[in-house]
Amino acid sequence: AVDFVDGESYGFEALVHVPNQAPTGSSQAFFVELGYDAAGLADRPMAGTAALPVTQSLSDCSVEVLSRVIDYRQNRLRLGFRIATHIPSGGGVVIATNSTTGLEFELLSSLSSGDNPLPDGANSFVDNSLSRIIIEAGADGI
């Protein structure tokens, strides 16, 4: 048992594992309860929660290709995803491959229009020397 003094502030520090994705089976919060192992509510005097910020992650990711045939030069790749948190101006998303086979990208105009356009002010460009596509946040971020 621990004796607490009325009017005194207490705190604690602990290591926390940040998951790769937001929880889907519970609230995104810390739960603190004093007397958590007591059998009755009368012996469990205090509880509280502290909301957590959204876990930085991508969700609803999808990859669509026109063809899976090797060396098909007119192939099209469509990537889709949602970003869970705000990316500030100057930040962005890098989509990279580990391909060593000379994979080259060409951005099509449909990336900035249509059903799923880039956010307003965002720019996209290709760095074929490293086989990657870069989406850069505009002044308002993404």
Image: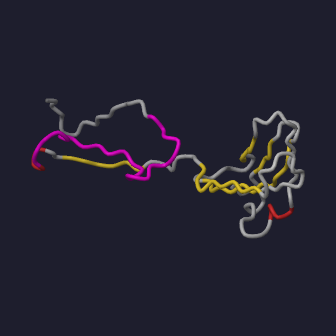
Which residues are drawn in magenta? Answer: 17-40
Does residue 119 appear left or right of residue 54 in this picture?
Answer: right
Residue 106 vs residue 36, the one in the foreground: 106
Residue 37 vs residue 105, the one in the foreground: 105
Name the image quarter holding the N terminus. top left
The image shows residue 119, relative to residue 45, as above or below, that is below
Q: Position of residue 30 (x, y in %)?
A: 36, 45
Does residue 6 appear left or right of residue 98 in this picture?
Answer: left
Q: Quadrant of residue 122?
A: bottom right
The image shows residue 21, relative to residue 129, as above or below, that is below
Q: How many marks?
A: 0
Does residue 128 appear left or right of residue 85 in this picture?
Answer: right
Q: Position of residue 85 (x, y in %)?
A: 59, 52
The image shows residue 45, relative to residue 102, as above or below, that is below
Does residue 95 appear left or right of residue 27 in this picture?
Answer: right
Q: Residue at x 29, y 34 (%)?
A: 10
Q: Quadrant of residue 102?
A: top right
Scheme of image coloration: secondary structure
Name the image quarter holding the C terminus. bottom right
